Amino acid sequence: MGERDNVMVEWIDTTGQSRWQDRTYTKKNLRTARCRTFGEVLEDTESYITVAGSVDDTNDNVNDAECIPRSAIQKVTILKKARKKPE
């Protein structure tokens, strides 16, 4: 996987609650979240992958970026290989 590839990252995220509730209810109902992130790879390291959901090639700006720890990632699927960087 390379920089600027378009990918789908499947990963596990934490969830939480911030109110008083019964311990048994919390143990039964609080679970991790299964997430999917789609976007362009900005950085791919041994520790994390950074993906941007929106890219402005004119100014090389990005939006809706997420840095996902490798330990949370279940699978990465390359949807489209990187295109040549615009001149």
Image: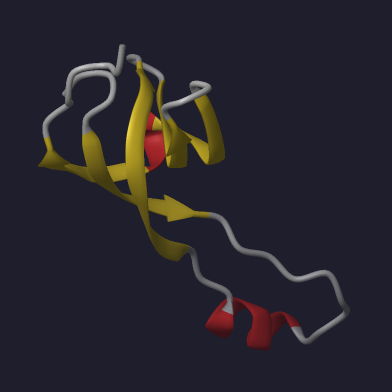
Report the residue that reaches farthest toward the right: 20
Question: Where does residue 39 sit, x and y in percent of width and height?
Answer: 35, 43
Question: Where does residue 5 sit, x and y in percent of width and height?
Answer: 22, 30
Residue 48: image quadrant is top left
In the image, residue 10 above or below residue 42:
below
Question: Where does residue 83 sit, x and y in percent of width and height?
Answer: 17, 25
Question: Where does residue 59 sit, x and y in percent of width and height?
Answer: 53, 22
Quarter of the picture containing the N terminus is top left
Between residues 37 and 23, which one lies in front from this camera angle? 37
In the visual, does 20 lie left or right of 4?
right
In the image, residue 79 above or below residue 4:
below
Q: Residue at x 81, y 84 (%)?
A: 21
Q: Residue at x 28, y 25 (%)?
A: 4
Residue 73: image quadrant is top left
In the image, residue 60 above or below residue 40:
above
Q: Residue at x 46, y 25 (%)?
A: 58
- Coloring applied to the structure: secondary structure
In the visual, does 48 lie left or right of 21?
left
The number of discs equals 0
Quarter of the picture containing the C terminus is top left
Between residues 36 and 60, which one lies in front from this camera angle? 60
Q: Residue at x 59, y 77 (%)?
A: 27
